[in-house]
Image (tube, grey):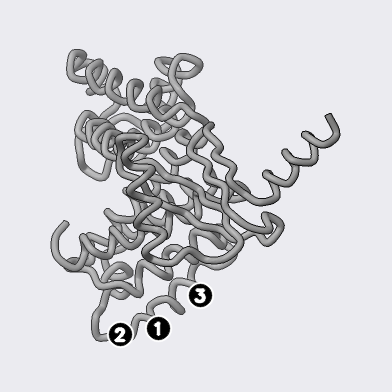
Amino acid sequence: MRGASRESLKAARESLAALTGVPTTDVTALSDDLAAIAALLGSEVSLRRLLTDPARPGDARADLVTELLSGKVGENAVELLAGLVRSRWSQPRDLAEAIDELSVEAELALAERAGTLDAVEDDLFRFGRILAAEPELTQGLSERIPVRQRSGLVDSLLAGKANPSAVRLIQRVVADPRGVPVLHGVERLSAIAAAHRERITALVTAVIPLTEAQRERLTAILARGYGKQIRLNVELDPELIGGLTIRIGDDLIDGSLAAMLAEASRGFAA
């Protein structure tokens, strides 16, 4: 992607990170919904042209998305797609490719939440190497073979042996390769996973919104500590009283006033 599409995808990633950073978000459903929408737009040229038509106001394109998809996919997917079609795209097909990539990013965010992102990346890489070394297997997963057989073959090879997120991603590529060899599709998954692993999402809970200067300072501090790019998702919780908490994977940094008061209370009781 280039130009407007690259900037639109960047903004969409931020929106997705905000959604997946909320503990109550059903990330599996969101990922599945985005994959289904990407498949729809991949096959419907006129629809993706309509949703990226610069002559139509962004709000009108968003209203069309809401009308078409409400009740058919989850609200989070509809909201995310409405934001996507408000943005500008260099080419209509870029929209479908972006949604497909976001569906992968959502599945990876689920693995990150579970602490299994490294395992997913390893499984994708290993399966890609197996495909490269086994031409007969690649032929067995080609579009000439019925989808049910292709899916069954993946299950026989990976079910119970690979991370569930990796299996779901591979199954999508196998079920809907879109004219691209399965090996190339799996290699693309590996590349997206590698890029995702270089970025860490920090869920920050605060009493009041952080200023831009505070966000930049906190991002820089966390980036130095973890040695990776940091994305901040900030949510508000007045029960903290003051301060903030930061959750990165299994790590919890609790600097809230409520936690300090609780610790002081335990000290008095002892």
Mark 2 secondary-structure assignment: loop
Quadrant of residue 92 in the image? Answer: bottom left
73 shown above or below 160: below
User: Which residue does the image show at 54% across and 39% down from the upper left?
Assistant: 253
Please give left or right for residue 80 compared with residue 43 in the image.
right
- Residue 11 horizontal/vertical position (percent): 32, 62
Q: Position of residue 245 (x, y in %)?
A: 57, 47
Graded by Cα atoms within 10 Å as few (under 14), some (14 to 19) or many (20 or more), the crowding at tag 3 reads few
Q: CA distance from mark 1 to mark 3?
A: 11 Å
Q: Quadrant of the C terminus?
A: top right
What amino acid is at disc 2?
Arg
Q: Is residue 13 visible?
A: no
Q: Secondary structure at mark 3?
A: helix
Q: Secondary structure at mark 1?
A: helix
* Residue at (36, 52) in percent of width and height: 39
Task: Name the N-terminal-most of marks 3 and 2.
Answer: 2
Q: Which mark is residue 67?
A: 3
Q: Which residue is mark 2?
A: 56
Nearest the camera: 196 or 78? Answer: 196
Disc 1 vs disc 3: Cβ atoms closer than 8 Å? no
Hey, what amino acid is under mark 3?
Answer: Glu
Task: From this view, report whether residue 255 is shown above or below residue 175.
Answer: below
Q: Residue at x 40, y 58 (%)?
A: 215
Q: Position of residue 145 (x, y in %)?
A: 31, 29
2 and 1 marks in contact (CB < 8 Å): yes
Quadrant housing residue 243: bottom right
